[in-house]
Image (spheres, helix red, strand yellow):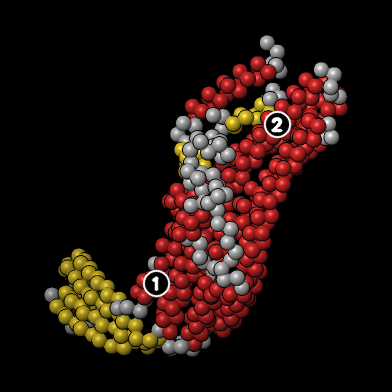
């Protein structure tokens, strides 16, 4: 059998389809809300950020512990042997040997009364926790943006594949019609060549779309850590094309500057740097501690054999730094420079956030009009295809005119699908910049989707795609 024949290609495709279908039986359908729940539980980046935040929270109790009483106890018990040589009454040395047991029990208490360093460290720890919590919020918002991007990129790839396959069928029908007309003496060779060229081009586009389909699906699977089967498709009839509310970009910018997660983390970093400066300056200040101890010594040394002492002491310990070789001054200058760095980083972040908010605000606003304009363009392109087909039957239009009209309709439908997804992602990014993207927003967008399942033909592509290595293009594995 000729390896390049259609029968051989079909047999190869059917064999590979069966293998891929068997390997993907564990895949299941899901919508955006289900993807969100899986992503929160499975996304490695978000889980790492959550663990990092949990670790950062422990900085507060650790810093507070430095300001609270420190109580320690100790005990020792020893068996001792001592040889001594001392002058006797006659001036002659007297040798003595002692074997005895000694024991010491002690309880020590230290309470900080004044330690500027410890108090600044405690305030710094609280600022670091605020920064970590803000970073965790940012990580969640980034996860939602990444998830929506991956989900709708997969939908776009699915829809692109569906459009291309639909167009391939149309071009195939036109090619057959041109061949039939030529054989009947009513067509031209040019019509056949034009139709064949369009058909060959759509085959190459199908291969590219199949590769993109697998890539976008793997992107989504990497986030949710689950195989993906059918995806709930976007239902244009349910989609709400709403401009930003409020309609003033300045209000969105003001809100973003107040609650944006990156800016909240940057503010906390500035406060942490200020406390680091206070810690450096504390090197010039004294420390005051209350110290107390209770000890019990039995035969503590050779001079107190068989003697028991109980000692209680309470006092104040003051340590006054005098000179450290310029180390404290250098630390203070370093802390000042770091404070300036964090202040400038905040300002740069604020400006960048303002620009991003204005950009996404404009994308959402313009997206509404772009989608509506392309919806009208789709209706016009459908009418153009119909008119060219009628004109061809009447002899006023050629096959090339029909092919051009069909290609324009394909492009319009692709642009319309892309515009809808871009509007959704711009809306998600805008709300993410102002800290408003959460499960409720995901739920609202999820209402725009049709139920997942095999009947969702526009997006019901399994995880495997067979590429026609023998020249048959690409086809979905069902």
Q: Residue at x 46, y 51 (%)?
A: 33
Q: Is any atom of residue 360 visible in this view?
A: no
Q: Name the foreground residue: 432 vs 121.
A: 432
Q: Name the foreground residue: 96 vs 477.
A: 477
* Label placed on residue 170: 2
Q: Name the foreground residue: 126 vs 24.
A: 24
Position of residue 473 measured from the top left corner of the image (x, y, whole percent): 68, 28
Rounded to the nearest angstrom, the CA distance separating label 2 from label 1 is 68 Å
Position of residue 354 measured from the top left corner of the image (x, y, whole percent): 63, 71
Assign a secondary structure to mark 2: helix
Q: Residue at x 46, y 38 (%)?
A: 28
Quarter that holds the C terminus:
top right
Establish if 57 lies above or below 157. below
Q: Name the residue under label 1.
A: 60
Establish if 40 lies above or below 161. below
Q: In this view, does 79 lie to the left or right of 364?
A: left
Establish if 95 lies above or below 30. below
Position of residue 344 measured from the top left corner of the image (x, y, whole percent): 63, 76
Q: Is any atom of residue 423 visible in this view?
A: yes
Tell how many labels.
2
Assign a secondary structure to mark 1: helix
Q: Residue at x 40, y 84 (%)?
A: 115
Quarter that holds the N terminus:
top right
């Amino acid at each position: 059998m000729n390896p390049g024949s259609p029968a051989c290609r079909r047999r190869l495709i059917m064999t590979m389809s069966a293998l891929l279908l068997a390997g993907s039986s564990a895949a299941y359908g899901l919508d955006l809300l289900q993807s969100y729940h899986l992503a929160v539980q499975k996304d490695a980046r978000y889980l790492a950020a959550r663990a990092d935040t949990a670790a950062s929270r422990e900085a507060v109790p650790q810093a507070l512990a430095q300001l609270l009483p420190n109580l320690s106890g100790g005990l020792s018990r020893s068996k001792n042997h001592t040889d001594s040589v001392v002058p006797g009454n006659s001036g002659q040395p007297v040798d003595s040997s002692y074997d005895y047991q000694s024991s010491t029990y002690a309880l020590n208490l230290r309470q900080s009364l004044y330690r500027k360093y410890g108090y600044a460290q405690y305030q710094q720890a609280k600022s670091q926790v605020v920064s970590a919590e803000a970073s965790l919020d940012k990580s969640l918002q980034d996860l939602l943006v990444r998830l929506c991007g991956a989900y709708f990129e997969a939908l776009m790839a699915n829809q692109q594949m569906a459009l291309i396959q639909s167009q391939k069928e149309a071009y195939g029908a036109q090619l057959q019609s041109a061949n039939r007309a030529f054989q009947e003496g009513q067509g031209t060779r040019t019509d056949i060549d034009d139709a064949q060229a369009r058909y060959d081009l759509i085959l190459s586009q199908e291969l590219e779309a199949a590769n993109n389909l697998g890539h976008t699906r793997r992107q989504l699977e990497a986030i949710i850590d689950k195989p993906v089967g059918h995806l709930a498709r976007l239902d244009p009839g349910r989609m709400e094309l709403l401009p930003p509310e409020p309609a003033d970009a300045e209000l969105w910018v003001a809100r973003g500057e107040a609650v944006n997660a990156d800016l909240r983390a940057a503010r906390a970093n500035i406060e942490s740097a200020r406390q680091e400066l206070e810690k450096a300056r504390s090197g010039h200040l004294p420390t005051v501690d209350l110290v107390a101890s209770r000890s019990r010594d039995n035969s503590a040394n050779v001079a107190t054999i068989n003697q028991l002492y109980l000692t209680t002491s309470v006092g104040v310990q003051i340590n006054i730094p005098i000179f450290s070789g310029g180390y404290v001054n250098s630390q203070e200058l370093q802390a000042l420079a770091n404070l300036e760095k964090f202040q400038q980083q905040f300002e740069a972040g604020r400006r960048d956030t303002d620009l991003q908010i204005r950009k996404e605000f404009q994308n959402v606003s313009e997206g509404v009009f772009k989608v509506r304009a392309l919806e009208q363009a789709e209706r016009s392109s459908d009418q153009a295809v119909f008119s060219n087909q009628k004109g061809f039957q009447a002899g006023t239009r050629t096959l090339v005119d029909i092919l051009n009209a069909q290609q324009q309709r394909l492009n319009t439908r692709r642009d319309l699908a892309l515009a809808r997804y871009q509007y959704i992602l711009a809306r998600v990014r805008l709300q993410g910049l102002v800290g408003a993207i959460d499960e409720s927003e995901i739920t609202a967008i999820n209402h725009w989707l049709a139920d997942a399942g095999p009947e969702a033909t526009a997006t019901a592509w399994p995880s495997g795609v067979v590429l026609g290595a023998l020249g048959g293009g690409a086809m979905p594995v069902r």
